[in-house]
């Protein structure tokens, strides 16, 4: 086996196997260093290279050829070289490019989050919170499509689609019969089935989980509840078709929705079948393992059990990333006598207690 190679991303150096992409290397570091992705999906062959959200700056090509790369590159499609140095969140050019890509992705997006079932767990919503602007410069009418029925369980809302191709790869690689694909070109390109066929393969429900936006949603859950009001638990059942390991979204004793379990990058851990997803909604059918730890930093992580949000194999310390200690906006001790002079709240273990503060005398 070839020796590992060294790559430095945002001032953190790691060893990775040859052939690793910059994105996968950044994910090994974890946290905010990993660029956002809207089309890449590690479980789907051929995915990536469509959306440009994962752009990074290569400031040193390799040990042998240290010249920087002339343009920002898509990290999901660019392999690392030995000695390569990459800037992701530390590059102003990258931050600027992400803003531009976010603006492009939102050009035709209906921004109907208040009525969209994906709200709260939408990757485009998260991306625009982090990189979007409060206003739009787009003055034209947004592109719209006629509603289309693609079957009893899956709702297609084409106006929300960002053309990431993930659902097409999922159907191609998971099911024996792919009934849908991308029709037409350019601005007219759309997800559709040929002559309104229904998507009814036993694993086709997984297209709902891979869709980063609300273009493909679960008809059996539609408009029934907001995801942040439901409580996710990990559960399993004896299923003859899939692993039976799923996530139940419950309110009280009622199972509102069943999805696959997802990892910290929002990617499905194990594909589940349609019977588990759409037809097994009685809590008695499942063995509940315990509350889900939400690892992904997003709206849905609020108010739920937090997992390892912001970290992967090793904790990412902001001073390591930016190469110096973060600057405090002001020193609380010079502004107020509320804290005891020898207590620095950022350095104590766990939450502050009354002992840490001066008692009013
Ligand atoms: S429907 Fe969803 S998964 Fe399919 S291409 Fe559009 S955004 Fe991607
Ligand atoms: S995630 Fe790399 S181009 Fe879309």
Image (cartoon, helix red, strand yellow):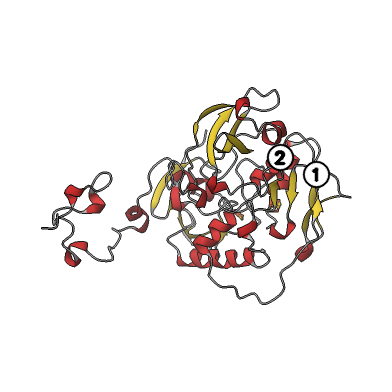
Q: Residue at x 66, y 56 (%)?
A: 50
Relative to residue 168, is residue 48 drawn left or right?
Answer: left
Asked if the residue at label 1 sits under 8 Å from ligand 1, the reply is: no
Indicate the secondary structure of the residue bearing disc 1: loop
Residue mark closest to the camera, 2 vs 1? 1
Q: Callout 1 environment at 10 Å: few (<14), some (14 to 19), or many (20+)?
A: some
What percent of the width, then of the height, locates residue 35?
Answer: 51, 54
Q: Callout 2: few (<14), some (14-19), or many (20+) C-alpha neighbours within 10 Å?
A: many
Q: Residue 331: where, in percent of width, then height?
A: 22, 63
- The residue where tag 1 is placed is 151
In the displayed structure, would residue 346 be above or below residue 337? above
* Image quadrant where residue 74 sits: bottom right
Is residue 152 toward the left or the right of residue 37 in the image? right
- Screen quadrant of the C terminus: bottom left
Image x and y of residue 248, in percent: 58, 36
What is the residue that sits farthest to the right in this orientation?
195
The secondary element bearing badge 2 is classed as loop
Of the two numbered discs 2 and 1 on the same chain, state the one appearing first in sequence: 1
Ligand 2 quadrant?
bottom right
131 or 135: nearer the eye?
Answer: 135
Q: Is mark 2 within 8 Å of ligand 1?
A: no
Rounded to the nearest angstrom, the CA distance separating label 2 from label 1 is 11 Å
Q: At 17% across and 62% down in the image, what residue appears?
A: 333
Nearer to the camera, 353 or 299: 353
Q: Residue at x 54, y 58 (%)?
A: 127
Disc marking residue 296: none
Could you say where residue 106 lies in the image, as x and y percent from the top left? Answer: 63, 65
Q: Is residue 193 visible?
A: yes
Contact (Cβ within 8 Å) of mark 2 with mark 1: no
Q: How many marks?
A: 2
Which residue is the site of mark 2?
205
Q: Residue at x 20, y 49 (%)?
A: 354
């Amino acid at each position: 086996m070839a020796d590992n190679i060294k790559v430095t991303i945002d001032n953190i150096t790691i060893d990775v196997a040859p052939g690793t992409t910059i994105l996968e290397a950044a994910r090994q570091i974890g946290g905010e260093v990993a660029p956002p992705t809207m089309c890449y999906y590690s479980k789907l062959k051929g995915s990536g290279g469509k959306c440009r959200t994962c752009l990074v700056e290569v400031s040193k090509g390799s040990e042998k050829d240290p010249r920087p790369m002339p343009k920002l590159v898509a990290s999901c499609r660019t392999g690392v070289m030995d000695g390569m140095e990459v800037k992701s969140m530390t590059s102003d050019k990258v931050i600027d490019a992400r803003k531009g890509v976010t603006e492009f992705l939102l050009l035709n997006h209906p921004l109907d989050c208040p009525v969209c079932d994906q709200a709260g767990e939408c990757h485009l919503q998260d991306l625009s919170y982090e990189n979007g602007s409060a206003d739009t410069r787009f003055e034209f009418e947004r592109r719209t499509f006629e509603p289309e029925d693609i079957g009893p369980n899956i709702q297609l809302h084409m106006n929300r689609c960002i053309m990431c191709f993930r659902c097409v790869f999922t159907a191609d690689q998971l099911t024996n019969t792919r009934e849908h694909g991308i029709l037409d070109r350019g601005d007219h390109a759309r997800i559709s089935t040929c002559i309104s066929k229904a998507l009814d393969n036993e694993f086709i429900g997984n297209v709902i989980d891979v869709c980063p936006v609300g273009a493909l949603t679960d008809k059996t859950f539609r408009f029934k509840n907001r995801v942040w009001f439901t409580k996710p638990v990990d559960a399993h059942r004896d299923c003859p078709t899939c692993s039976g390991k799923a996530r139940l979204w419950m309110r009280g004793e009622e199972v509102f929705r069943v999805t696959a379990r997802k990892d910290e990058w929002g990617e499905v851990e194990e594909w589940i079948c349609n019977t588990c997803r759409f037809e097994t909604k009685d809590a008695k059918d499942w063995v509940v393992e315990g509350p889900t730890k939400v690892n992904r930093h997003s709206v849905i992580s609020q108010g739920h059990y937090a997992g390892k949000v912001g970290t992967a194999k090793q904790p990412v310390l902001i001073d390591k990333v930016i190469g110096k200690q973060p600057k405090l906006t002001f020193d609380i001790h010079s502004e107020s006598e509320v804290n005891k002079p020898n207590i620095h709240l950022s350095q104590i273990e766990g939450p502050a207690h009354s002992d840490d503060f001066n008692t009013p005398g």
